[in-house]
Image: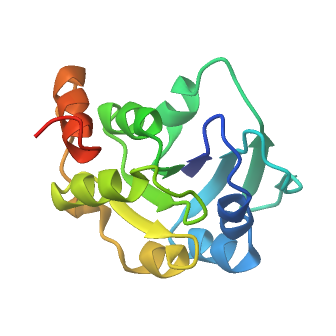
Amino acid sequence: MKRVFVTVGTTSFDELITRVSAEETLHIFKSLGYSRLTLQIGRGTVVPEPFSAECFTLEVYRYKDSLQEDLQRADLVISHAGAGSCLETLEKGKPLVVVINEKLMNNHQLELAKELHKEGYLFYCTCSTLPGLLQSMDISTLKCYPPGQPEKFSAFLNKVVGLQK
């Protein structure tokens, strides 16, 4: 049973939740062999109706004390571009698609996603380009992020946001 885990962290990213729970995207997940979609929706106002059918299950929750179990079980993680969510997923060695929230301004999410993509650690897109990316990406091309080096990620993040040259 292949699983997709979607997380928005503590934020609200209704556009992402709407996109991943849309019939078109559910069809794409099924065509790629995924049979379970878990949505962590944070403070969002969009709350998809959970369901369990013969070949697909959709689970929804706002928060848990820890996302460790969901991350561990996931075969694919789709996340907002929060640095903590990215690092946590990459350190677990999970394929990651980062979705940029275009409604947020001056938050460096795009720069972080671009850099980590350039290094080969993840894919990134916007809500509107997510379906196309899901159908065209090859997760076998992603590099494994070196675990246990938060200081390197911190230095990398400082460089991306302009705190360090």
- The relative height of residue 91 versus residue 116 in the rendered view (above or below) is above
Furthest-right residue in this view: 49
Is residue 136 at all visible to an observer of this figure?
yes
Q: Quadrant of the C terminus?
A: top left
Residue drawn 71% across the image and 58% down it: 17
Q: Give the percent coordinates (x, y) of residue 128.
A: 57, 78
* Residue furthest left as drawn: 165
At x 37%, y 43%, the residue is 94
Left or right of 43 in this view: 104: left
Where is residue 2? Give x, y as percent: 53, 52
Q: Is residue 8 above or below residue 65?
A: below
Horizontally, residue 134 falls left or right of residue 8, namely left
Question: Percent from the top left, x then y, of residue 119?
Answer: 15, 54
| Image spot of residue 142 (x, y percent) | 23, 56
**In this picture, is 20 found above or below 74?**
below
Where 11 sits versus 77, above or below? Answer: above
Camera-nearest residue between 163 and 122: 163
Q: Quadrant of residue 23?
A: bottom right
What's the colour scheme? rainbow
Left or right: where 140 falls relative to 48: left
Q: Is residue 148 visible?
A: no
Foreground residue, 7 or 84? 84
Q: From the viewer's perspective, tell me whether residue 146 is left or right of residue 11.
A: left
